[in-house]
Image: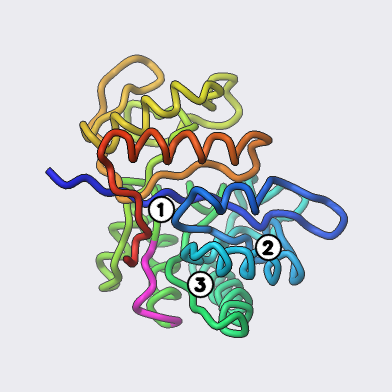
């Protein structure tokens, strides 16, 4: 069986004098970049710099759209309407697309961030609003969402190409949701454990949940968080391990 996977990372999250992550180091190893668009993180200059870095490395560019919550890094849930979700999505898509166009490239995908991502994974109405915004902006964009959740289902209803995403550095609950970050055991801190989870997802289509149960999990893309202090090293080991196992690592649109 020919195994392939996209390896993505959330980057471009620096803001003003505040620097987060090692974007240049991460971009050496991933195939898709989800670039913050100024709502939850990032600003105009960081978007411009990150797009340029991604173009230089030949990495596919996607919009990482979030809630308007810089102080909370977009990880605090907000009560928003479907129309607000649609407008927020379009606003951020347009901003990043401008920088991509000037750099001689285009957006390839969209992935919500943080609280918006988890809200859209549960709420079909919110997921439909995001999917409709993506379709209205560019029906060729791939909509990336939590595997087997409401967001990829909404993308399919909207006629979009979708990508089911899994995380190498997050633990899962028995229902397929991500373990809430408020729990001490929500994150996988050991890179070897993250590699094992990645290989289990790609080769076996399964993971072990936080409480030790097996869970079937299909994924088209794996995420390694760019805000980890060791994100570049993690991305390097993940890519090497995947390719050594015979997995082709390539962008979603390739």
In the rendered image, residue 141 lying in the magenta stretch gets the answer: yes
Which picture quadrant has residue 57?
Answer: bottom right
Q: Nearer the viewer, mark 2 or mark 3?
A: 2
Residue 95 position within the rendered picture, expressed as x and y whole percent measured from the top left = 63, 77
Q: Residues within 10 Å of mark 1 (few under 14, many from 20)?
A: some
- CA distance for labels 2 and 1: 21 Å
Residue furthest to the top in view is: 212
Residues rendered magenta in the picture: 137-143
* Residue identified by numbered label 1: 123
Name the residue located 25 percent from the left edge and 42 percent from the top edge.
Answer: 218
N-terminal-most mark, 1 or 3: 3
N-term-proximal mark, 2 vs 3: 2
Please give the residue where the numbered disc 2 appears in the rendered image.
39
Q: Which residue is mark 3?
A: 86
Q: Nearer the viewer, residue 195 or 171?
A: 195
Q: Nearer the viewer, residue 176 or 163?
A: 163
Q: On screen, 249 above or below 185? A: below
User: Which badge, 2 or 1, comes first in the chain's sequence?
Assistant: 2
């Amino acid at each position: 069986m020919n195994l392939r996977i996209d390896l993505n990372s959330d980057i471009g999250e620096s803001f003003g004098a505040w620097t987060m992550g090692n974007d240049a180091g991460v971009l050496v190893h991933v195939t898709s970049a989800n670039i913050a668009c100024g709502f939850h993180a990032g600003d105009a200059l960081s978007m411009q710099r990150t797009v340029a870095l991604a173009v230089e490395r030949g990495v596919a560019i996607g919009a990482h759209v979030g809630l308007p919550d810089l102080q909370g890094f977009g990880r605090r849930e907000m009560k928003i309407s479907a129309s607000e979700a649609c407008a927020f999505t379009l606003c951020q898509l347009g901003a990043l697309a401008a920088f991509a166009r000037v750099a001689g490239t285009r957006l390839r995908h969209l992935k919500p961030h943080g609280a918006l991502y988890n809200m859209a994974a549960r709420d079909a109405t919110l997921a439909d609003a995001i999917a409709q915004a993506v379709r209205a902006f560019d029906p060729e964009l791939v909509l990336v969402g939590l595997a087997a959740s409401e967001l990829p289902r909404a993308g399919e209803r909207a006629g979009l190409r979708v990508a089911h995403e899994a995380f190498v550095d997050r633990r899962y609950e028995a229902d397929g949701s991500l373990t809430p970050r408020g729990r001490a055991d929500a994150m996988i801190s050991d890179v070897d454990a993250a590699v094992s989870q990645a290989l289990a997802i790609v080769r076996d289509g399964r993971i072990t949940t936080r409480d030790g149960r097996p869970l079937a999990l299909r994924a088209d893309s794996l995420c390694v968080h760019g805000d980890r202090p060791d994100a570049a090293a993690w991305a390097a080991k993940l890519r090497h391990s995947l390719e050594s196992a015979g997995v082709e690592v390539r962008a979603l649109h390739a």
